[in-house]
Image: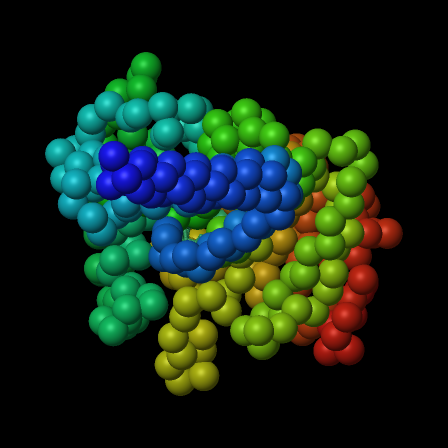
Amino acid sequence: MKKSVGKTAKAIIAAVIVIAIIGTVFTYRLYSREFSSSFTAMDTYITLKAKGVGCKDTLDEVENFVKDYSDNVLSRHIETSEVSKINANGGGTFSSGISDYFDLLLEISRESDGAFDFTLGALSDLWGIGTENAKIPTDKEIKSVLFCSGVDKIFYKNGKISIPEGMSIDFGAAGKGMALDEIKTKYLEKSKISRAVFSLGGSILLYSTKENDTFTVGIRNPDESNDYMAVLTVNEGCVSTSGSYERYFEEDGVRYHHIFDPKTGYPAQSGLVSVTIYSESGTVSDALSTACFVLGAEKGAALAKKYNCEAVFIDTEGFVTVTDGLKDKIEITNDNYTLR
Ligand code: AMP
Ligand code: MG
């Protein structure tokens, strides 16, 4: 009798302990009001910060989504990804993760007069910028890959795409922005998160449920990797920066960087070192930062206006040009840069 009472008491104590632990973990996850995480995916360093009920769980889901979107959808280097299979097979059917954005990408390509061109994968491979095999290709090699690229050579209807032999689709210039748009609609807007800042390399999502909430965002100093040269104070939206400092090599005093002018097949020489775009949409901010880098400040500002975006252009001389909507929202914090 005594023995069984002892056993029952022990079982009750154990059960109480287990319930207490589960309760603590549950309460922590439910009410933890601020959380941040960081990891690497999409070839870049990613940080997620959020406030609100259940934010830890949402950030875990977002991290899983970003890794999946990167490896299984957009990657050009993982053979089993959707983009790799389309490139290997000369076409295929897009999942919604791409098809939802594809018409917009085609339109930006047209509106930018081809400056934004997501068919330059073979050209990127030829230059190898950012890899051990980086080299200046011959004009003949460049001509032969440009012959197989260009959005006008794609056939696309109802989510089905076919591409010519030799073409390689590369969403490197818009993928991080597409991921931010996916995250916003599929996770943030369905969560109880009240404020979030998600930074995917050069593309940042600023999210708030409070009207007119403001965020400060640093614009990277093109000369110093861990420094910024200006601060923007803006409301919710997306901010993307493209710069010639991200991946490059130098030969005979010339910098060869990773953003190509599709018309020449050479790194774009538009007199700029960086372009920052502020837009409601991540896809637009990311694609336009690349397009405007290729187009230069004047044509870039006109393109930004067409898409209701604001822009910051930094030129090779350290002069900074800003579109009207950001004029009173930017503060230059480094004396080497001058606002025009
Ligand atoms: P971003 O850093 O967003 O400007 O994207 C740069 C990446 O986009 C490069 O590393 C290439 O993979 C790809 N890319 C380079 N030039 C272009 C271009 N003119 N249009 C679209 N994608 C490009
Ligand atoms: Mg971009």
Residue 109 in view of the camera: no
Image height of 225 relative to 119, above or below = below
Query: Please, which residue is most extreme toward the top here?
Result: 158
Q: Is 315 above or below relative to 176?
A: below
Q: Residue furthest right?
A: 328
Judged from this view, the residue extending furthest toward the front is 1
x, y percentage for residue 305? 69, 37
In this picture, residue 22 sits left or right of residue 95: right
Is residue 51 visible to us here?
yes
Residue 339, position as x, y percentages in the image: 80, 64
Q: Residue drawn at (13%, 34%), measured in percent from left and top?
A: 89
User: Is residue 99 left or right of 318 when viewed as pictured?
Assistant: left
- Within the image, what quadrant is residue 91 found in? top left
Q: Residue at x 59, y 44 (%)?
A: 32
Note whether 185 is above or below 72 in the view shown.
Answer: above
Q: Look at 41% across and 28% down and name the residue there.
A: 102
Query: Looking at this view, is 196 or 133 the one in front?
Result: 196
Please state the horizontal and vertical placement of residue 209, each as a whole percent of the image. Answer: 70, 32
Residue shown at 50%/31% (left/top)? 187
Residue 106's x, y, as percent? 43, 30
Quadrant in the picture for the C terminus = bottom right
Q: Residue furthest bottom?
A: 252
Q: Quadrant of the N terminus?
A: top left
Left or right relative to 271: residue 62: left
Q: Nearer the viewer, residue 109 or 61?
A: 61
